[in-house]
Image (cartoon, rainbow, N blue to C red):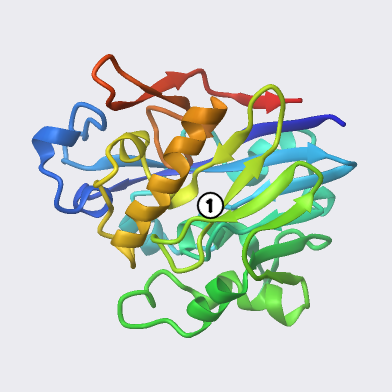
């Protein structure tokens, strides 16, 4: 069976590095993530297009196109490589062609493109798709706390739910042959990576298990966004040896400098992410 996957840019935002790097001093991270003249770090919003078993699957949908002008300014949002729908069209995919949307989690920068404005209504962007998310993630998004309510925005997921297009998972699950959702708790309680069991090596779409590539080689580095930072560390300790043992191709959703990579060890036994070329992620 053929499994093709391609990285789909949906935009780029510029954020205060205190978000992705938390307590890590600038001197330690700035070589890996050089900030701009305003001191902001670029954060890409990439999706993953998967075509297999006669199905078209999209993993995450970026911020979408519902933001107000003020929202665009607040996010410092730009589209250096085009929008989600532009790039899907470039690969011959129309919104109605998408069979499955996998939401790794329901933060706005990952699921804003789930829905679109049509007049006064907000409707699913992909009218024929089954949207897949962890049940606990949906519960947390539906009942946000003071910290999370700024990123769990009902307009990004409630219209999908009210139209019966959500499928809720209870842990790891195979979605299609060779396509699995796997829990990686920490950034949220029920965030899921997407694992593609391709040959000769698997592909792991990292989502916010590792916001930037450097986060995956520096185990103790966690973001200020993580709701359970110690769980993030535990999840990395699970997936780092797996990535080494399987020579896995790692896809970093937010990293503007390292989009695809492999994890290795240097001569002193320290973990090291080795950058690969971007674009077509893999095929098997």
Q: Residues within 10 Å of mark 1 (few under 14, many from 20)?
A: many
Residue at image position (66%, 56%) is 102
Residue at image position (39%, 61%) is 186
Q: Nearer the viewer, residue 90 or 129?
A: 129
Quarter of the image where one finds residue 270: top left
Asked if residue 156 is positioned above or below residue 34 in the image, the reply reads: below
Q: Nearer the viewer, residue 135 or 182?
A: 182
**Tag 1, which secondary structure?**
loop
Q: Nearer the viewer, residue 127 or 212?
A: 212
Residue at the far right in the pictured view: 54
Asked if residue 2 is positioned above or below residue 117 in the image, the reply reads: above
Asked if residue 201 is positioned above or below residue 154 in the image, the reply reads: above
Residue at image position (36%, 61%) is 231
Q: Which residue is identified by label 1?
A: 62
Residue at image position (69%, 22%) is 200
Residue at the far top in the pictured view: 267
């Amino acid at each position: 069976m053929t499994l093709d996957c391609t990285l789909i840019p949906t935009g780029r935002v510029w954020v205060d590095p205190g978000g992705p790097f938390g307590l890590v001093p600038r001197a330690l991270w700035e070589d890996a993530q050089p900030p701009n003249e305003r001191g902001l770090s670029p954060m890409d919003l990439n999706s993953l297009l998967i075509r297999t078993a006669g199905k078209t699957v999209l993993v995450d949908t970026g911020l979408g196109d519902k933001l107000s002008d003020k929202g665009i300014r607040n996010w410092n949002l730009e589209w250096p490589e085009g929008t989600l729908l532009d790039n899907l069209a470039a690969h011959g995919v129309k919104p109605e062609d998408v069979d499955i949307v996998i939401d790794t989690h329901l933060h706005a920068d990952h699921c804003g493109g789930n829905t679109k404005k049509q007049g006064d209504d907000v409707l699913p962007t992909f009218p024929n798709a089954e949207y897949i998310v962890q049940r606990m993630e949906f519960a947390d998004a539906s009942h946000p706390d003071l910290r999370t309510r700024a990123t769990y925005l009902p307009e990004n997921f409630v219209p999908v739910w009210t139209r019966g297009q959500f499928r809720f998972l209870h842990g790891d699950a195979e979605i299609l042959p060779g396509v699995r959702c796997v829990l990686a708790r920490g950034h949220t309680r029920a965030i899921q990576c997407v694992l593609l069991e391709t040959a000769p090596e698997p592909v792991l779409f990292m989502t916010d298990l590792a916001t930037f590539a450097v986060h995956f080689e520096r185990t103790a580095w966690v973001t200020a966004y993580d709701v359970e930072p110690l769980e993030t560390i535990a999840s990395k300790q699970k997936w780092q040896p797996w990535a080494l043992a399987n020579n896995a191709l790692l896809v970093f959703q937010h990293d503007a400098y390292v989009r695809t990579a492999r994890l290795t060890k240097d001569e002193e036994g320290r973990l090291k992410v080795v950058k690969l070329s971007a674009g077509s992620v893999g095929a098997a």
